[in-house]
Image (cartoon, rainbow, N blue to C red):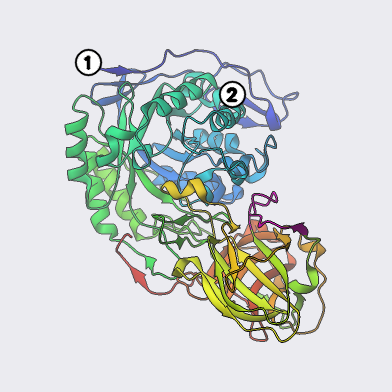
Amino acid sequence: MNTYTISGESRMRGARARFGRTFRGAAFVIGSVASAQPVSPPRAHRFAVEGKQFLLDGKPYQIISGEMHYVRIPREYWRDRLRKARAMGLNTISTYVFWNAHEPQPGVYDFSGQNDIAEFLSEAQQEGLHVILRPGPYICAEWELGGYPSWLLKDRSLVLRSDDPKYREAVHTWFERLGKEISPLLLKNGGPIMAIQVENEYGSFGDDHGYMAELESALRASGMGADVLYTADGPGNLPKGSLPDLPAAINFGSGDAEKSFAKLNELRPDGPRMSGEYWAGWFDHWGEKHHVTDGAQEAAELAWMLRSGDSVNMYMFDGGTSFGWMNGSNSDGSDFQPDTTSYDYDAPLDESGAPRQKYFAFRDAIAAATGKTPAQPPPSPALKSFAIDSHMESASLWENLPQPKESDALLTMEDVGQAYGYILYRTKLNAGEGGELVLDGLHDYAQVYLDRTLIGTLDRRLGTKSLTVPTLKAAGTMDILVENSGRVNYSHVILTERKGLTGKVLLGGRAPKHWSIYSLAMNDLDALHFHQQPCEGPCFFRVSMHVPETADTYLNTHDIQKGMVWINGRALGRAWSIGPQYSLFTPGPWLHKGDDTITFFDLMGGAKDCIRSESAPVFGGTTSQRN
């Protein structure tokens, strides 16, 4: 009989007083530490694996879990989503930890507000849910660079997902800091975390078992040694990504349950049967169709797994939104598929948190398998549309450029300390210059201008990297405005996923000798100078939305060609006329009663630019095929 566990501890390693949060029994209570009643010791529990089953305090436990990500759900709605998880019949939730959200600069940590993972997990425990934590450090998740902070790429010799000493040092430092948040929340310390995943689908990337063992050791050393540590991979990659002394879960999509578990039984005949990710939906790429999968088939397959005694983590239960610049991209090294801001995923809860028919089909399947009928889900508030002013101000990008960095060499975003947004490369041309312009290593989307007149667009997604520059009759200026469309989050491409112009630039066979490089992170809208005149080309637009009472809404972006949208200075997400996403979820808690400010940037701005508030999302054509 195989047993995978770590000896439990019956006491907390330090009470958690951050934000006045204290332990009361097995739950967390928000309040002033000074005024709180005497706090009883948290109740410790033990989670283990014996043979093919999980045990909670010595009794068989079937994990019925759903994935939801705290950074993709407005903090004010965490409780609502967790209650809906419980009401669907889940006993566990799973979440990744998003390193780049918590450490935007080396040594600068943020665990506040939207990033307060400890509060999110505490609320899960209060709602009667256990937790599976997936801290990576690599997480995939269709998230920018798979959760890695982009500053890791500034050192070109550092190798992600490897035993490189500089990478290992960065991971150990991060884990040490994260462990301070996580250790008190382990099940053995009275918290909700019963299991922690080591890395993420490493078998699809490599087979260095020494690297995986090192990460396991780092997790334990940081205080994140949960009762159960495990790995998860696709069935065919399990031997490469797993560790012999840890249980292994398998990840697969709808329709593949029987053959996937058969493979798991073949590879791990004495281990527990668990799907680390059951893909009950799929995500969208720009320029493709919106995914809508067969909920009835997925409910039937879920029922089969539960009847078979399998543990399941449904990916996703609530997809939510990759707000701001945080969408990832896919690439096999030759193609490029940036993901949309919406991470709706056709999950049981839609992007606004409302249950769709799939939710109730899954709820029925879980109730039938467990013999338990959960409570009714809490009601979802109605979405509303709001009036938007017809009067709009504008600000030309050209008139709002920051001070450039002068360089004879091309510099990437990472070289200049920039994570997201746009970057502008400017060079002077002499009369008679022109010819074929070749951008080697364009990451990701570029518009090329002569004296501020657009002459062409190049798109990594389409594989275009050259255009013809007209021969100049007089000296002039060439601008190359480059967008970071979302760093690749999957495959070995992450190792070289710097943004901007990452290779050579040749014009007529020769490389320009000098560049003025403008970092355009677009994180300070207050610095923009708006006016009343129309604007064409790369422009910012600002308009008021009248909100009598706050409520969730969608901003229709159909008339924006390509750019970014903010509400009250907070980045909502991307807009692109190629679809399939034509609206942005705008949470009511991010609005205030009265006039709210919508700002948007359009690379191809003009008189037709406008934005509307609507009470439902807008998507283009749909597909049920995962790609």
User: Residue 417 placed where, x, y %?
Assistant: 69, 49
Is the stretch drawn in magenta largely helix, strand or loop? loop
User: Residue 350 placed where, x, y %?
Assistant: 44, 59
**Residue that appears at 62% across and 74% down:** 448
* Helix, strand or loop status at disc 1: loop
The answer to which quarter of the image holds residue 90 is top left
The segment highlighted magenta reads 405-420
Amino acid type indicated by mark 1: Met
Amino acid type indicated by mark 2: Arg
365 relative to 437, above or below: above
* Helix, strand or loop status at disc 2: strand
Is residue 233 left or right of 415 when viewed as pictured? left
**Residue that appears at 75% across and 84% down:** 474
User: Residue 265 placed where, x, y %?
Assistant: 18, 33
Could you classify mark 1 by the number of other residues whose Cα lies within 10 Å: few (under 14), some (14-19), or many (20 or more)?
few
Q: CA distance from mark 2 to mark 1?
A: 37 Å
Q: Which residue is mark 2?
A: 24
The answer to which quarter of the image holds residue 514 is bottom right
Q: Which residue is mark 1?
A: 1
